[in-house]
Image (cartoon, grey):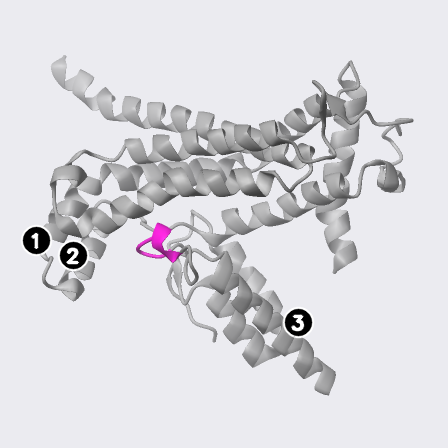
Amino acid sequence: MVHLFQVIFYQPILNLLIFLYNVVPGESLGVAIILSTLVIKLVLLPLSHKSIKAQKALQDLQPKVDEVKSKYKDNKEQMGKAMMALYKEEKINPFSSCFPLLIQLPFLWAVFRVFRDGIESNLHLIYSFIATPESIHNMWFGINLSEPNIYLAILAGAAQFWQAKMMVAKRPATQNNGGKGDSMTAIMNKQMVYFMPMITVFIGLTLPGGLTLYWFVVTLFTALQQILVFKQTKKAKEAPVVIEQK
Amino acid sequence: MLIKLYIKKLVISLIKIYQKTLSFDHGILKGFYPHGYCRFHPSCSEYAVRAIDKYGVLKGGIKAIRRIWRCNPWNKGGWDPVE
């Protein structure tokens, strides 16, 4: 089982990193980490794209959801039924899914091990067609990527804050002056926006800088992807209006 | 035979620890997803516990992995208990 994990996740990620380290001029581990993050993110792109789109659709539906909530606020069972009917009518699945979340955990663990164990101690795991570098420079812009680094931790937290804020900001304003039943959602949104980035900073402070850098870049790419998906869905909505005007 | 039982108990308690900590469906993070995170019912982790309890770590584990594989954005989800 451990060996299987090594062959499927750990070894390819290690090799990708070493390959990029070799190919990109300047022998920079930091650049190699950023590029390999981009590759991993591209591999998982179809999954994350679909998830972000679903989340966005759910947010756009929020006014109608609030309407249903205030209509049935005394009857929880009726409310649940009405909401499910609404989702069905709009052809939206309000649930997330486990696979995209869980597939990231082995990746994270593999990246973690690459940095925890140091690359030097695992050079025998490099594929024969990839050149083995004589030594790996851990330093990048004066940051030692094998040791925890406070700046990278704060950057990762900041990226997380930006990403969560963007998701929540898109929710319609009716929530603020509307029903009391939504205060719970509002609290949860607040936690998502403020609490999770703080946790990211604290965890980031204990991990090797390379891993925190990976986390920062992943979050940054996710945020950029969100901007793209939001723009796309906006365009798709505006399109029929243009046709009507003609 | 006894060792098999121990392994089974260990794996199930590991999943239960996951449920209490990281899971968006069972533990402290539950509030982030008011309708639940998993698109199936019972959730993937609960399914895994039941499958392993019924069929053992190996066969039940494979069933659980297949369930997680099914739990992707293209699947409709819904009621899907361990057969």
Which subunit holds the residue at mark 2? A
Q: What percent of the width, then of the height, locates residue A37?
A: 62, 31
Residue position for label 3: B58
Q: What is the magenta range?
A: B30-36
Residue position for label 2: A82
Q: Secondary structure at mark 2?
A: helix
- The answer to whether the residue labelled 1 contacts the one labelled 3, judged by CB atoms less than 8 Å apart, is no
Given residues A11 and A76, the one toward you in this image is: A76
Residue drawn at point x = 41 percent, y = 59 percent: B25
Which quadrant is the N terminus of chain A positioned in?
bottom right
Residue position for label 1: A71
Q: Secondary structure at mark 3?
A: helix
Task: Mark 2 or mark 1: name the one nearer the start of the chain.
Answer: 1
- Badge 1 crowding class, 10 Å Cα cut-off, few under 14, some 14 to 19, many 20 or more, is few
Which of pointers 1 and 3 indicates the residue nearer the eye? 1
Q: Are marks 1 and 3 on the same chain?
A: no
Residue drawn at point x = 21 percent, y = 48 percent: A183
Q: Secondary structure at mark 1?
A: helix
- The quarter holding residue A22 reads top right
Q: What percent of the width, then of the height, locates residue B57?
A: 64, 73
Q: Are marks 2 and 1 on the same chain?
A: yes
Q: What percent of the width, then of the height, locates residue B27?
A: 43, 61
